[in-house]
Image (cartoon, rainbow, N blue to C red):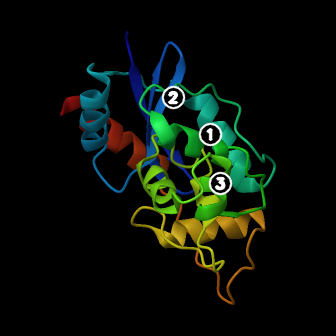
């Protein structure tokens, strides 16, 4: 199977996405060089994706609409082939959490069929191949606190505030939007790498 990748600029930072014939197989917000993400997904796929600038333009537009508050869910085919077992059950249960709502790790474990597997839900959230697209940011601790979002709990809080799931802080912290040129530079660097 052949896969392609692209780097896009989002209001939440640069992101790298990988698609195949069955849809989006990987999507992650990144902090730096996208090559690390490309290598990581290539190892899992057993195939090296080819660069394809502009291939995620539609998804980029949807993310812009989400950030503007005019979109509540993403219309993108997901290829779940990198997720198996309980992680797959948990992530698919998470897709059912409505915009503007949250669920605890324990509640997702219950819906996914393993009521005592709250920690496993946390692991599934941490390892999701679909950052932002599968709304793992809507999964919170049982006490209602936000919890982690990879290494970026401030991004999780910003997403929940955007959706109205939690009240904004007195001085809300929003993730700075990166410049499109920065995303293009990251794409070019990774394509050369």
On the image, numbered disc 1 is attached to which residue?
92
Q: Which mark is residue 80?
A: 2
Occupied quadrant, residue 2: top left
Residue 69 relative to residue 11: left or right: right
Question: What is the CA distance from the residue labelled 1 to the residue labelled 3?
Answer: 13 Å
Q: Position of residue 161 (x, y in %)?
A: 70, 70
Question: Which one is earlier in the sequence, the residue at label 2 or at label 3?
Answer: 2
Q: Looking at the image, tell me whether mark 1 or mark 3 is earlier in sequence order.
A: 1
Q: Residue furthest left?
A: 193
Q: Nearer the viewer, mark 2 or mark 3?
A: 3
Q: Secondary structure at mark 3?
A: helix
State yes or no: discs 1 and 2 in contact (Cβ < 8 Å).
yes
As displayed, is residue 188 above or below residue 182? above
Say left or right for 98 vs 47. right
Disc 1, SS: helix
Residue 21 rendering spot, x and y as whole percentages:
50, 12
Establish if 155 lies above or below 36.
Answer: below
**Point 53% across, 66% down: residue:** 155
Q: Secondary structure at mark 2?
A: loop
Q: In 3D space, how far apart are the residues under numbered discs 1 and 2 (Cα atoms)?
A: 9 Å
């Amino acid at each position: 199977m052949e896969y392609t990748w692209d780097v896009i600029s989002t209001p939440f930072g640069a992101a790298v996405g990988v698609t195949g014939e069955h849809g989006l197989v990987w999507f992650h917000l990144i902090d730096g060089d996208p090559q690390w993400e490309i290598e990581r997904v290539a190892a899992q796929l057993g195939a090296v994706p080819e660069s394809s600038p502009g291939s995620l333009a539609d998804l980029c537009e949807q993310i812009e609409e989400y950030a503007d508050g005019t979109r509540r869910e993403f219309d993108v085919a997901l290829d779940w082939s990198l997720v198996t077992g309980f992680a797959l059950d948990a992530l698919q249960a998470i897709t059912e959490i409505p915009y503007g709502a949250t669920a605890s790790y324990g509640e997702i474990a219950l819906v996914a069929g393993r009521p005592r597997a709250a920690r496993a839900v946390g692991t599934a959230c941490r390892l999701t191949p679909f950052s932002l697209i599968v709304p793992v940011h809507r999964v919170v601790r049982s006490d209602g606190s936000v919890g982690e979002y990879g290494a970026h709990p401030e991004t999780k809080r910003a997403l929940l505030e955007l959706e109205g799931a939690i009240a904004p802080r007195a001085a809300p912290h929003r993730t700075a939007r990166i410049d499109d040129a920065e995303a293009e530079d990251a794409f070019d660097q990774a394509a050369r790498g």
